[in-house]
Image (cartoon, rainbow, N blue to C red):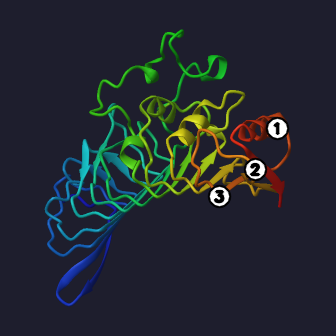
Amino acid sequence: MDTSCCAVQCSCAHPHLYHIEFLCAKLDGLPLVSQHLRTLDLRGVSLQGSFLDFSRCPALEDLKMRHCQIDVDKMSSLSLKRLSIIFCRSGLDHRVSVSAPCLVSFTLDSFAGRTPLLESMPTLETAYVELGRACSDFCHYYINRGFCGANVAPCVNCLGYSDESSNTVLLGAICNAKHLELISPLGMMIFARDLKSCPIFNKLSTLLLNAYWCVGPEFHALTCILEHTPVLEKLTLQLVSEEQVHKVEMKGSYSSTERPTGISEHLKLVSVKYNVVDDRILQLLKFMCTFNIRFSFE
């Protein structure tokens, strides 16, 4: 393989290879072959061809990718349990497909290019998905007219999925998670489009959402996700960026004299984190009160 500018670190036990790490490498695109490889770290690596086809690595359980160029059609593994894709990018004009049906933990953070298309992950327990500003799946009309809708000729990014094999890009695959964090800047269309075919999150007990989901006065995204999380126990609404530290936190719960309406009756705690009380916060609190949730300051 072409490994220009490459440093490889291996950790071995007995005669078998358990861990391999590629740094700043350009690989030739051929798939890895190992009966014993368990952990693979890729940092600053250019990936092409069939390198992410792990059908010949039956013991692989942990894959970490950071600052990688991912120009492959598909990433696949039947054994993988933990997958993190952080600050990676793709230059393809179609989505990278991710097939890892045995995942229990998944992280997608600040992917540049078209958002990867996730296939079913029935054993998933935890997922963190942050669509950063380098994501190319944004709505061109969002600032002035909201997301493209029935009365608006859709922009190129909001057109129907001509290259996807399912109705959703992300949510349909991660709907079995028990713990979930969904973060996006305003104007990204993936979650908005996925919500039109929103699955039921039958196992989800804890959910963290950022300000993207809390756009009033209708709060369509927040309403939709709450209506599809029937066993939710804890909801955190983080209305400050990750770079900021929230100054105020309010915690809410159902009124002792009123039953919940339209959302999980198991919901025990709603936490709202923010810096200043403005119209956005007041609208949100008023909206949550429609579900018989009352707040107090911490």
| N-term-proximal mark, 2 vs 3 | 2
Q: CA distance from mark 2 to mark 3?
A: 15 Å
**Which residue is at a point 28% across and 54% down the rendered structure image?**
100
Q: Earlier in the sequence, mark 1 or mark 3?
A: 3
Q: Residue at x 73, y 51 (%)?
A: 272
Which quadrant of the structure image shows residue 115?
A: top left
For mark 2, give the secondary structure.
loop
Q: Is residue 221 left or right of residue 64?
A: right
* Residue 298 percent location from the top left of the image: 83, 61
Q: Which residue is denoted by mark 1 in the rendering?
A: 282
Q: How far separated are the C-alphas under marks 1 and 3? A: 21 Å
Give above or below for 214 relative to 177: above
Residue picked out by circle 3: 268
For the residue marked with disc 3, what is the amino acid? Lys
Please tell me whether mark 3 sits on a helix, a strand or a loop: loop
The kind of residue on which mark 2 rests is Thr
Q: CA distance from mark 2 to mark 1?
A: 23 Å
As rendered, which of 41 and 145 lies closer to the eye? 145
Q: Residue at x 75, y 50 (%)?
A: 257
Pointer 2 and pointer 1: residues touching (CB < 8 Å)? Answer: no
Label 2 belongs to which residue?
A: 257
In this picture, residue 199 sits left or right of residue 219: left
